[in-house]
Structures are given as C-alpha cells and as structure tokens.
Image (spheres, grey):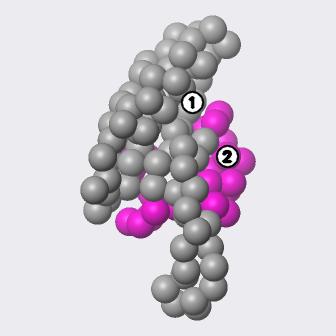
Amino acid sequence: MSDTLESLPDRPLRQQEVTALNHADAFSLVVPVDREDAVEADTREPVVITERVILGTDDWVTGLVYDDGWLEVESVAIDDPDEERFDAMRDCESAVADYDLD
C-alpha cells in the first residue's frame, strides 16, 4: 500500500486523475468521496479536485485523505470481493468522511 501512496501526487487529485486511476490495472475501483471546485495554480483554469478517495483491489479497500500528504485512514482486507467489497467500501467511506481536515 505504501507504493500506492508514494505514487500519488503530493496534492489533491484532479477529477481526470481519479478517472485515469479507475482505468488503471492496479485498482478495481477508485471512488472520490467528495469533489470540490478549484483553480489550477499555473493556468488559473477551473478544475475539480478531491481530497478524499477510496481505492480498491480484489484483496483490499482503503480510504485515503489528503492532509498535507496522503494519509490512509482505513484499510479493510477482503477475501471475496463479490461478497465483502461493498461493506469494506462503506467502512472506508465512513472513516474518510469522519476525518477532520480542519
């Protein structure tokens, strides 16, 4: 999992990056928990970002929060993705939503 955190940019993810991660072979799901309108620093173009995301594979689901770096706030191992993934996602979503960014 630490390789995953290190591979993420040191900033909130842009919506296009979430979409690209969703199409990557490394994950079976990538779900933004929130979305926020922002302005790109370099170009001043509007952009949609997320500071809270859920990543999943066939072996685990994890909830990440960007707070001066990406933090894993919950991780749930799963043996049967078809049976366990939904509950694991709910657990991670709850932990991510409860994390205080302020």
> SS class of the residue under badge 2?
helix
Amino acid type at mark 1: Thr
Q: Looking at the figure, which quarter contains the N terminus?
A: top left
Q: Which mark is residue 57?
A: 1
Image point (65%, 34%), residue name: 28
Per the model, the C-alpha gap separating discs 2 and 1 is: 11 Å
Q: Looking at the figure, which quarter contains the C terminus?
A: bottom left
Please provide the residue range marked out in magenta: 1-30
| Residue 11 in sight | yes
**Residue 83 in the image: above or below residue 63:** above
Examine the image and state in which quarter residue 43 appears: bottom right
Left/right placement of residue 97 relative to residue 71 reads right
Indicate whether residue 12 is drawn in magenta: yes
Image point (52%, 57%), residue name: 50
Image point (67%, 13%), residue name: 82
| Residue 26 in sight | no
Amino acid type at mark 2: Asn
Please tell me which of labels 2 and 1 falls first in the chain.
2
For this rendering, which residue is in front, 85 or 94? Answer: 94
Residue 63 in percent (x, y) is at 44, 37
Residue 96 in percent (x, y) is at 41, 38
